[in-house]
Image: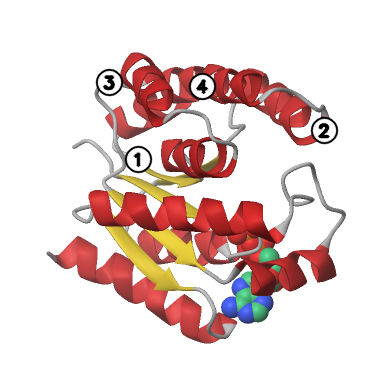
Amino acid sequence: MRGRFITFEGIDGAGKSTHLTAAAQLLESYGHAVLVTREPGGTPVGEGVRTLLLEAPMDACTETLLLFAARAEHVRRLIVPALEMGRWVLCDRFTDATYAYQGGGRGVPEAAIAALERWVHPDLQPDLTLLFDLEPAVAATRVGGARTIDRFEAEQLEFFARVRSAYRARAQAHAERFVVIDAGANIETVRRQVLEAVRAWISQ
Ligand SMILES: Nc1ncnc2c1ncn2[C@@H]1O[C@H](COP(=O)(O)OP(=O)(O)O)[C@@H](O)[C@H]1O
Ligand SMILES: [Mg+2]
């Protein structure tokens, strides 16, 4: 049986990476073979593109095309083959992130992103998307305390406010696959919400 494709979305510092591991462990405890991956990344080309994207200044158009170039590799070489083998794929960001960051954040036309999406993965959408929804100011303090920041994390709060609202619009427009997690709660509470959302989704 084909596996399931679950994506983790939200602004930088919202808690995606923290809770992906817990979700993977839950699914493994149910006996599923799980593949954890991320975007941009997941393949040699994807990881190369990731380094460029996080460091080199570039136009928003270039940024969008590079993201989809990395995604084309990721979908064809990793995600779809894994799903076909019956593995459950958990991905830290996917195309919703391009709508949110490049669309909402940088003003790339939604129609351009939609055209690339139709070309790169016409037959693939996440089965479930967890949106970690968090106030940008809170996310900034979490990121600031934790690590050296990259080109995206260095953006201003208004940028993340636009990204967040684009994410929320995606969640409303695709309510059949989105679950919005209140990422402002403490780690344990968020973890419970995540595991409950995955359990509820599996049992329905
Ligand atoms: N609910 C939470 N409350 C407080 N700190 C958190 C919470 N969730 C995550 N963190 C911390 O915030 C930082 C960013 O979390 P992370 O999972 O890396 O976010 P993302 O992958 O979405 O950018 C990490 O240091 C993490 O330990
Ligand atoms: Mg992360």
Which x, y percent locates residue 111?
A: 36, 24
Q: Is residue 17 left or right of residue 94?
A: right
Q: How is the model colour-coded? A: secondary structure
Amino acid on which disc 2 is placed: Glu
Residue 68, label in figure = 4
Q: Nearer the viewer, mark 1 or mark 2?
A: 2
State the CA–CA distance, disc 1 to disc 2.
32 Å
Q: Which residue is mark 1?
A: 87
Which x, y percent locates residue 57?
A: 81, 28
Which circle's residue, 4 or 3, is located before the other in the chain? Answer: 4
Task: Examine the image and state in which quarter residue 41 appears.
Answer: top right
Residue 55, label in figure = 2
**Is residue 49 or residue 140 the one in the foreground?**
140
Label 1 crowd (10 A; few <14 / some 14-19 / many >=20): many
The local secondary structure at tag 2 comes to helix
The residue located at (47%, 18%) in the rendering is 72
State the CA–CA distance, disc 2 to disc 3.
30 Å
Q: Which residue is mark 3?
A: 122
Task: Examine the image and state in which quarter residue 107 appears.
Answer: top right
Q: Quadrant of the C terminus?
A: bottom left
